[in-house]
């Protein structure tokens, strides 16, 4: 939620910041703004409601002065509607301090009240603006920007991060992280320094980065990067060398990032699987959880958690863990985990899934579990992100940077990681034989090629997408391993095409949802060979008998069921445990092409943000 970027160095700051904001726009696109500082002159700001392109158009008419340092922001509105006035960066009462903020100042009402009583005029409806005024009040007492930030942090409640500049220290940018909402990552380069909410904004400039931990402050100038605890003690940042391929984050030949990322999946899966297994001889090689063998051998109960698409990955993970280990396994939505008194006996393994590693509800749930002392493993696509710091072990997926707001390749790579985790648990607990484990690994290794073939033949799917794009409601039905894919299919459909779609267990359909069925409320049934096809086909008949339309996803060659339903598309045949992969590809493509037919803004669906760092 909200993208922050700060740059100081030898280049002209505005174009660098604009470019960075383009790569951060997935975090929010309600408004955008840039502030630059030019020597001793007042800070200049450009802010505009709407997308970054609106800000760019505005800046063509009213350009910012040339400058070598500045901060920028893309907003996902929490407090105050999208407007020019509510757009960041926000300034202090005299205009000498600017702030770009991500997260929530939970006590902003009382701070606002106190500031007003001291005569400060607050112009926006945001929670963020108070930070700028408080910083100026502290700086006016003689504090440096960095010390003012540390002091002001003690007044702020809630999880957040921000970057700030002061007119009295041109060339200096200070950033801070408080809590789990919104990480900050610092980019190191000769004669330049930058700070961003996501590494993706740094990749065009540098591969040397360091993540700011909770309650750390960083001060950057063109040739120094210094980090401190909030108490003022200097700390060493852990600098990592990324090997991200910058090309992989661009759209390439594809019209939308979502399509590009769907098409990336064979490679993303192959990279992920190769990093976690060795072949010839075949064995599991999950380095990030090495050292947990003794703890894992004692596990009697597994709890998985995640949000959104990662929650659906957790549901698939449950199928794998139950099947491969026989351990009782629960899945809990991370935000609900916090609202319940979940029993976590000491022999529990908590597995969290978060592609970004930054989702605040996941982090909060992990922190609760940490207090209870259970073993934690996290699955993430972001190296060194916050979840990997909380967990005892981490399994990284190798999907490459995912920028489309609707997650695609991080979903399939996460379920591949969960499949391998389930096998490793089974190996440690002696549930499956080595031969069985090897056979399962070899099955998984074949998936990328299977999907590659599937993605080369989408003609029938595109025709179906055109036909179904006229409907405004959909029921997605699945059973067993493909129930989570029905839920994911419905989510993808909602996210990118704005069609109302509900995912349901096929057997549950007759306990309520069937009342909705008529010829304008079709069903999309996942009825592959391994999706308990026979039972699902009875549910299909029940819908057809009530004049409901049924579209179905079937296993290649299932002409019997194809003859019954209104329209069908095929997916390749695979094993029971791997059917979720090929079914996922179908529902992702379907949502994409339906959204395309409906002319939706696929890469920037309304109201959404990719990384959700507010509760
Ligand atoms: C947001 C995104 C989803 C994503 C979810 C969890 O809602 O729009 O695509 O699945 O966050 O994100 P995470 O980074 O924790 O996997």
Image (cartoon, rainbow, N blue to C red):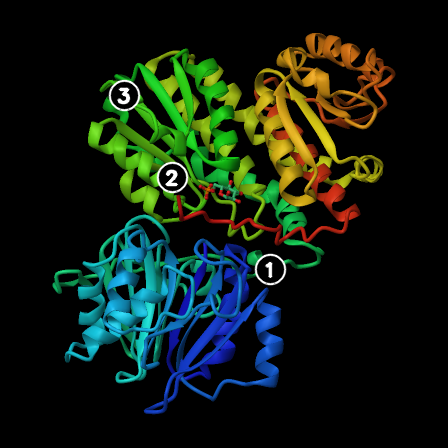
On the image, the x and y values in percent for residue 536 come to 70, 12
Vertical placement of 544 versus 501: above or below? above
- Tell whether 220 sits left or right of 276: left
Q: Which residue is drawn at 27% across and 30% down?
A: 369
Indicate which label's residue lies in the foreground, 3 or 1: 3
The answer to which of 157 and 492 lies nearer the viewer is 157
As measured in the structure, the alpha-carbon distance from the residue carrying label 3 to the one carrying label 2 is: 18 Å
Q: Quadrant of the C terminus?
A: top left
Q: What element carries label 2?
A: helix
Mark sitting earlier along the chain (3/1) = 1
The residue at label 3 has a CB less than 8 Å from ligand 1? no
Q: Residue at point 77% right, 26% down?
A: 521
What residue would you read off at disc 3? Answer: 344
How many circles with numbers are drawn on the protein? Answer: 3
Neighbours of disc 2 within 10 Å: few (<14), some (14-19), many (20+): many
**Image-based side of 235 in relation to 565, left or right:** left
Q: Name the residue under label 2.
A: 361
Q: Residue at 27% x, 57% y: name it.
A: 110
**Label 1 CB, ligand 1: below 8 Å?**
no
The x, y position of residue 522, in whole percent, is: 77, 26
Q: Nearer the viewer, residue 115 or 271?
A: 115
Label number found at residue 250: 1
Q: Earlier in the sequence, mark 3 or mark 2?
A: 3
Question: Do the residues under discs 2 and 1 have CB atoms within 8 angstroms?
Answer: no
Label 3 to label 1: alpha-carbon separation? 42 Å
């Amino acid at each position: 939620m909200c993208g922050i970027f700060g740059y100081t160095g030898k280049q002209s700051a505005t174009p660098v910041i604009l470019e960075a904001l383009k790569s951060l726009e997935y975090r929010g696109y309600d408004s955008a703004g840039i502030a630059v500082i030019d020597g001793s002159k007042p800070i200049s700001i450009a802010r505009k409601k709407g997308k970054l392109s609106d800000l760019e158009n505005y800046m063509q008419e009213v350009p910012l002065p040339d400058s070598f340092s500045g901060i920028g922001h893309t907003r996902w509105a929490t407090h105050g509607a999208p407007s020019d006035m509510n757009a960041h960066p926000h300034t202090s009462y005299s205009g000498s301090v600017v702030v770009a903020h991500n997260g929530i100042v939970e006590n902003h009402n009382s701070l606002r009240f106190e500031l007003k009583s001291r005569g400060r005029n607050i112009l926006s409806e945001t929670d963020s603006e108070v930070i700028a005024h408080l910083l100026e009040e502290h700086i006016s007492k003689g504090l440096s920007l960095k010390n003012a930030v540390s002091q002001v942090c003690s007044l702020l409640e809630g999880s957040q991060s921000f970057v700030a500049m002061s007119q009295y220290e041109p060339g200096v940018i200070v950033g801070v992280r408080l809590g789990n909402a919104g990480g900050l990552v610092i980019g190191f380069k000769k004669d330049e320094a930058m700070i961003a909410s996501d590494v993706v904004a740094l990749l065009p400039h540098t591969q040397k980065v360091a993540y700011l931990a909770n309650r750390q402050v960083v001060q950057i100038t063109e040739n120094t990067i210094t980090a401190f605890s909030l108490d003022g003690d200097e700390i060493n940042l852990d600098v990592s060398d990324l090997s991200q391929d910058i090309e992989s984050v661009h759209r390439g030949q594809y019209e939308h990032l979502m399509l590009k990322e769907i098409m990336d999946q064979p490679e993303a899966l192959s990279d992920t699987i190769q990093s976690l297994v060795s072949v010839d001889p075949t064995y599991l090689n999950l380095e990030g959880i090495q050292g947990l063998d003794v703890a894992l051998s004692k596990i009697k109960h597994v709890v998985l958690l995640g949000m959104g698409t990662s929650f659906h990955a957790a549901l698939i993970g449950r199928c794998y863990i139950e099947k491969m280990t026989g351990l009782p396994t629960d899945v809990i939505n991370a935000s609900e985990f916090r609202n319940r008194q979940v029993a976590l006996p000491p022999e529990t393994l908590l597995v969290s899934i978060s592609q970004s590693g930054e989702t605040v509800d996941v982090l909060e749930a992990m922190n609760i579990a940490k207090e209870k002392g259970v073993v934690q493993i996290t699955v993430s696509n972001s190296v060194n992100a916050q979840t990997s710091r909380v967990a005892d072990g981490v399994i990284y997926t190798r999907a490459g940077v995912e920028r489309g707001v609707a997650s695609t390749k991080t979903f399939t790579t996460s379920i591949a990681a969960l499949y391998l985790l389930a096998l490793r648990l089974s190996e440690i607990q002696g549930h499956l034989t080595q031969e069985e484990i090897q056979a399962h690994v070899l099955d998984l290794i074949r998936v990328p090629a299977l999907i590659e073939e599937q993605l080369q033949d989408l003609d029938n799917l595109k025709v179906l997408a055109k036909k179904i794009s006229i409907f405004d409601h959909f029921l997605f039905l699945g059973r067993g391993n493909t129930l989570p894919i029905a839920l994911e299919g419905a989510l993808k459909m909602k996210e990118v095409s704005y069609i109302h779609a509900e995912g349901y267990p096929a057997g549950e359909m007759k306990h309520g949802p069937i009342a909705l069925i008529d010829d304008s409320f079709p069903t999309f049934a996942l009825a592959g060979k391994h999706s308990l096809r026979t039972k699902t086909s009875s549910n299909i008949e029940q819908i057809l008998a009530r004049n409901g339309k049924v579209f179905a996803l079937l296993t290649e060659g299932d002409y019997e069921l194809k003859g019954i339903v209104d329209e069908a598309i095929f997916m390749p045949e695979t094993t029971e445990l791997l059917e979720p992969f090929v079914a996922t590809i179908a529902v992702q493509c379907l949502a994409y092409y339906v959204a395309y037919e409906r002319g939706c803004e696929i890469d920037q669906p309304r109201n959404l943000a990719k990384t959700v760092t507010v509760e």
